[in-house]
Each structure stands twice: as C-alpha cells, then as structure tokens.
Image (tube, rainbow, N blue to C red):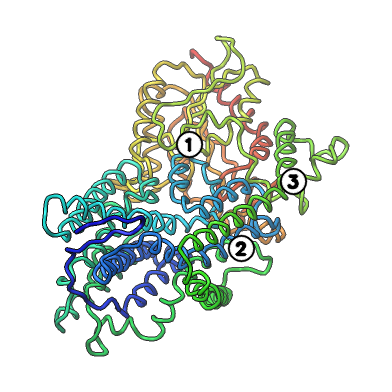
Amino acid sequence: MLTCDGSAVSISSFPRTDHSSFVPHIQGLRAIAVLGVVAFHLWPSALPGGFVGVDVFFVISGFLITGHLRREILATGTVRLAAFWGRRVRRLLPAALVVLGFCAVVISVPSLALLSALPARVKEIVAATSYVANWQLVATSANYFGDSNSPTFARHYWSLSTEEQFYLVWPLALLAGVAIARRVHRRSTAGTIGAVLLISLVSFGASVWFTEVSPAAAYFATFTRVWEFGAGALLALFPRLRARSASARMVCGWLGLAGLTMSFALMSDAIHFPGYAALLPVAATVLILAVVPGGAWWFPTRLISLPPFDFVGKISYSLYLWHWPLILVVPALPWWTGGITQTAALLLVTVVLSWLTQRFVEDPLRSWPWLVGARPRRTFAVGGAAMAAVVVLTIGLGAVNLPQFLSARSALADLRADPTMCSTPLNEPAEACDVLSTGGFFPASSIAGMDSPQSSECLAQFDEAEPLTCSFGTDDPDAPSVLLIGDSHAFQYIDVLADVAVREGWRLTTALKGGCPWSTTKLASEVPFARVCDEWRDNVSGWLLSQTPAVIVTSAYSGTQYAVDGYGSRTDAAVAGFAGAWSSPAVAAVPILAVTDNPAFPTNPNLCLLNRAATDCDVPRAQAVPAPDPMSSAAEARPNVHVLDNTDIFCDDAVCSPVVGNRNAYRDPNHLTASFAASLGSRLTVAIQRVLDAHPQGQ
C-alpha cells in the first residue's frame, strides 16, 4: 500500500531481497576517475580522454543513491525525502563551499588573477555556489567570447551542479513511477524500474541528438547526462545482474578496466561527447560495479581495492574540488616554470590539501551530531546560510576591485580612441596611463583581456548562420569598397579598419563569424557548430554575388581544426580551403589582401606577465608560428592575392614576444588587443592602398 505523509512515502509492496551495499572497489573506481581528470587537466595530450572520469562518477552516484533509496524502502517502507536531501547537503556542501571561498579570494587578488575576468569569475562562483554552474556554461557556450576565452576557477563545478540536480529530482521521479505503477499493477518494482528505464532512454536519445546539434552545450546540460546516472541506477535495481561467480567477476572486472583504459586513451575533444561516445566509459563502469566483492588477490576489483586506491578514493571528492583552482593559480607565481619537479610538488600539495579537507571538513560536518540529530531543516538552514555567506564574500571581494575595473575599462576606451596617447610623453594623460601601464608596457596584463573590439554586434556567434554585415566609413557610392571577411582573427582588425575607412574615404563592409574562417574546407566534425559554419559560408557566398568590392581583406586563425579527409595534413587542408574561397566565381577577379595570422601562445601570456618580465614570457618562434603559413602558400601563383605578413613585428629569428615595444599585444593566447591592432593601422592602410593601386577598379 502506498501512503504519502509530508516528506515520507510508504511502500509496502517493494521486493525485500537485500544485498550488501558495501562495494570496496568503488573507492578504487573513484580513484581511477579522479586521477584521470587530474591527469587530463595537467597533461591533456598525454591522457586526452581523462575527462571521462566525470562520467564514471555519474554512474557511481546513480548506483549508490538508487541503491540507498531502495534499501531505505526495504528497511522502513518509507523514503524520507527531507532526510535524504539533508544527508546530501552535509556530504557535499562543506568542502565545496570551502574551495569556492578560496576561489573567491584568489580572483580578488590582482597578482593571482586577471582583473579583466573579474565580472565573469564572480558570476561563475555564484552560479557554482547555487549549483547551476552547468546551465551557466550552456548559456555561454554559443558565445564566441562568452567565457572571456580563459579557463575559469570554478568551471569544474558544472559536474557537481549536475549531480545536485540529479539528487534533487531523482527520488521524486522514482516515487512518481511507483505511484503510477500502483494504479495499474500489484507490484511497485515495475514502476521504479519503468521510471528509471524510461527516463534513461529519453535522456540517452536527447544526448545523442543534442550532441550532434549543439555539442558545446550538450556537454554541460543535465538532461544529456541523466542516462549515465540511470545506468548505475538500473544495476542497483537489478541485483541479480551482479557478477558472483569467479569467472564472471574476472571477465566483468577486466573488461571494465579495459573499457576505461580505452576511454582514457582514445577519447578526446576530437569526438562529440557525450552522445554515443559516452556508452564506452558508462558500460565499463557498470561492468566493474557489477562485480560483487571478493575473489583472489589478483582479481581486478581486488587490485583496485588496495590501500593506495582506497586512499585516493576517500579523498577523491576534495581532490576533484582542489586540483583545478590550484592548476590555474600556479602559472601566475613568479617562480613557476611547469617543470617535472614543480608539477610533482603541485600534485603533492593538492593531495595533502585534499586529505586535510576530507579529514577536517568533510567527515566532521557530515557526522556532526548537532546537525545529524536534529530535523533536516536545521541542515538546510545552516547550508543555506553558508551558501549565502560564500555569495556575499564573492560579491563583496569583487566589489572591492570594481572601481579599478571600471577605471581600466574607461582608460581602455580612451586608448582605443587615441592609440598614441601613452606612447608620447608630452601627450600622456597621467591618470589614464597610470591605470593602463605596468611593467613598462600597456595595457597592463591584468586588464588586457578587456581590450577587445567594440563592434561585437558585427561578429556572428557559434549558432548564427546568417552573415551579420556592418558598414563603416563613407556613404559615397563611388568610394572604394573594402570587405573584411573571416573569423575572429579577421574581426580583431574591425575597429582599426573602420577608423582607416573614415580617414581614407573608403566604404568598409564586414562579414565575420567566430571560429569560422573564410574557406571552402570543412571544419573537423568535432568542432562545435561546424555545420552552422558551413551554412554561414554558403550564405556569405550568396551575399558576395551582390557586392562589388575593390578589395577583400581576410585573416584566419592558424590553429583552426580542418577536416583532413582527402588531404595530406591540416596545413594542406587549410591551403586548399583558402585557395578555393579566393577562386570562387563571386570573387575570382577581386583583389584580396590576406593578413597572415599573428603568432599564438600555448597559454594566456597575461597570466605569465602578471608577475614576470616580458622576456620571461617569450616562446620559441617555431612553437608560435605555423610553418609553412597556409595563407602565404595559398596565395602563391595567384596574382590577385597579396599577403601582409606581420610576424616579424612579434618575433625575431628565435622567439616571439607578447609585448612589442611598450605595447601588450595579446588579450588571450591568440587574439590581439584592440589597442595593439590599432597600432597596425598605418601598415594596413599602406597594404590596402597598394592593392588598390595595383588593381584599379573597372580595369
């Protein structure tokens, strides 16, 4: 019989066959999962699929939580929802809030974090504290510059937000299934299993579809991940599926470990995820969970139950919380070089800090009698107050730096209006340049990320297929028409070319899209919104038929991932794509100025510049500049294509620098600051004029 009483639901017809809930190798699974994630964040090229450790955690959570709910029903006939949620709060909230408090302090320290990212970081920590971090990431996933193009201290909280949302809804979903089943069946088991199966199938279908349509958003969305929890839940609801014989335990254990090994080694950002790809790590985790404890010492589940695995498994939650903020903080330290010894020391510090958090925060507060012995509402009140405190701390510390942020934004606007204002001592407005300058260059590394083009409405975002055309300069129909076409690396010249168009009496029209170069070579299938890029290119081709440009200016990110099918390499694919776009019927006779891409840095050079001299942040030229340059190669034997190569401005024969003269050239690893792009105005003007002179319109 089913009765509802407040937060409790009593079920009398649930099967009472019980099985031990103790699965010692779960700690080993947790250890494997968290070590995979940590290794991926430290050495992404060495373990490209380490991110699937998160999926392992999801399956484990579904197995344990559903098993717990089932056992509670068997033992008491009741699911006390408030008590269940209270246990989740005591288990997860304390350590999570401690680390978020640490993040709030770090982002407010100018020597450790970039001031330019302050508003985004405050939003991110508030979202993480509120357990909606994954949906914040979904909301910004279609915006090319939505996350300020730099790693975020609390981004890894997206998975914790997903889990908390699961914990909130899952008991209700199970009980709803039971209630429906009781109306048509004598047994409630069918309702529970039916609810889990239906939800999981719908979620899996949504995951497959959404991963193809919008892979960036699909990765973070809750509904694309629910089926992974459901896989663990189904195993908990079907105890007869557990592997009990020695042979079954050996086969399931080794197959599961092999599946996880393959996932860590073969998965990468080259694969749309989750979708179908997540089946491998999910199935592998289910196989390992299906093995009942016991067996000889060489059994796989016994091996991952050894003390080292058990230790890492116990601290896995805190280790997951701490590792990412620490990885992001250390590059700003003046003595950090990223060598093997320092990386080992970082790992040791992370493990020690995680153990301390587990020992003195997680365990004591989870079993604190003052909370455990009281009604759940006390836990909710304390947890809510703690969450509010972290939000207030984050906003308060952010507000301390807000005046500096606003001053920097105002000074950058002045600098964009007059790129020479801090270069000529007699002309120098002391207050603005004091805000802008540090270490002998401007803009300061802490604010360079804010120095972006102001015409953001002219850049089509990831999910936009229609060209967003903008016009600048003269309205004279007889004036030379200049088109600017390309991705964000063409967009970085929009402000300076708009100023040039006004000064020279040209008419500038732009068609720009983030992450989508003007090319006929398709992007690699793993690139988010690759299909939308194809549509945008087709639309631009149609738009070009209605244009009569005197010259087209284009540029493109050299690190773009192109599909290599039919080509020897990505470079060959890039060269063929540029040549194809420039030879299309609409523009075959139009002169083109191809601005080769600027050097790119492996990480944001501004993090290095925070506490180091500019020369300490140089990178080898061979690492920063592609050789051969695909645009230069595509221009060969095409007399209508002219090349402007600015590489030697940034680089000598050996190294490339993020600071050129007294100007900070970069706002992130590969985009130029708008003020530095403005300093290239004379070079761009001369180059365009030479093209116009070489190809008089109408001749």
Secondary structure, mark 3, is helix
The answer to which of marks 2 and 3 sits earlier in the sequence is 2
Amino acid at circle 2: Phe
Q: In the rendered view, would you say 424 is above or below 640?
A: below
Residue 332 image point, x, y percent: 64, 62
Q: Quadrant of the N terminus?
A: bottom left
* Residue bearing mark 2: 102
The answer to which of marks 2 and 1 sits earlier in the sequence is 2
- Res 108 → quadrant: bottom right
- Residue 404 is tagged as 3
Q: Are marks 1 and 3 in contact (CB under 8 Å)?
A: no
Q: Residues within 10 Å of mark 1 (few under 14, many from 20)?
A: many
Mark-to-mark CA distance, 2 and 3 = 21 Å
* Residue bearing mark 1: 487
Residue 420 image point, x, y percent: 77, 35
Secondary structure, mark 1, is loop
Q: Residues within 10 Å of mark 3 (few under 14, many from 20)?
A: some
In this rendered view, identify the residue nearer to me: 184 or 270.
Answer: 184
Q: Which is more foreground, mark 1 or mark 3? A: 3
Q: In the rendered view, would you say 144 is above or below 336?
A: above
Outermost residue, bottom direction?
Answer: 296
Secondary structure, mark 2, is helix
Q: Is residue 657 visible?
A: no
- 6 relative to 421 in the view: left or right: left
Residue 353 image point, x, y percent: 56, 74
Q: Residue shown at 32%/54% (left/top)?
A: 225
